Image: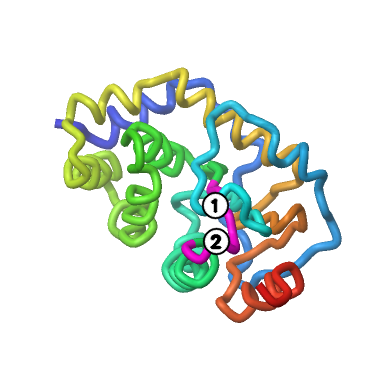
Amino acid sequence: MIDRRRFLEGIGALALTLAAFKTLGGSLIGRAEAQTVDTEKLMAPGALPDQVLGKADAPVTIVEYASMTCGHCAHFHETTYPVLKEKYIDTGKVRFILREFPLDIVAKAAFMLARCGGEGKYYPMTDTLFETQKNWAFSNNPAQALLAIAKQSGMTEEQFNACLNDTKLAGQIDEVAKRGAELGIDSTPTFFINGKKVSGALSPEQLDKELAPLLGAN
């Protein structure tokens, strides 16, 4: 039986480097910013391999930095992401990458579970976690709530425990988040659309507006 104390003690013992950028999340309204990052720097290999959806030669690449406990991130994934996937990713127009920027220890644990799922299970797990966020992210016993989700995905309790005690993986997620901070991330969700920084949960209409000039007649 896993309780909240054991969960927090176990994960809390890890060497966290995220304290410098803890916030409660970003804006509900997406806003484009003047900042554009060097795409080579943005797309350089990091501590963990990127989880990529879409064609490698898609004309547009969207990199999202998110936290699993961020309400605005969940809102984006519930409302706009399905449109993004059907209209742009599945049609070969957009390549999408979700990167970890956990704002608290529970979000970090959730990302660890997604990474531990195995080949092809990262996005099914993050989809489920965003869809059920209200049930686990603010639970009195987040460990037990996450365990239930992990079991539904086919993970055993032993695998769950091993995943959350994987200090190497925890450190790698810290490095992904640290890299995000170096790119100017200070809230979630934040997107880079072909290098252009856009902060906040984009609506479907805002997404279309951002992508239209990049896709032209495609």
Position in image of residue 75 (x %, y %):
47, 68
Q: Is residue 71 left or right of residue 161?
A: right
Q: Earlier in the sequence, mark 2 or mark 1?
A: 1
Residue 93 part of the magenta-drawn span: yes
Which residue is at 76% across, 73% downward? 213
Label 2 close to label 1 by CB (< 8 Å) = yes
Which residue is at 82% across, 44% downward? 38
- The colouring scheme, among rainbow, by chain, secondary structure or one colour, is rainbow
* Region rendered in magenta: 90-98
Q: Which of 95 and 110 is in front in this view?
A: 95
User: Could you tell me which secondary element the residue under label 2 belongs to?
Assistant: loop
Alpha carbon distance from label 2 to label 1: 6 Å
Residue 5 part of the magenta-drawn span: no
- Amino acid beneath label 1: Lys
- Amino acid beneath label 2: Gly
Compared with residue 135, is residue 184 higher up or lower down, i.e. above or below?
above
Q: Is residue 71 left or right of residue 129?
A: right
User: Could you tell me which secondary element the residue under label 1 belongs to?
Assistant: loop
Q: Residues within 10 Å of mark 2 (few under 14, many from 20)?
A: some
Q: Residue 203 carries which label?
A: none
Residue 157 sits in which quadrant?
top left
- The image quadrant where one finds the C terminus is bottom right
- The residue pinned by badge 2 equals 92
Q: Which mark is residue 55?
A: 1
Compared with residue 146, is residue 74 higher up or lower down, i.e. above or below?
below
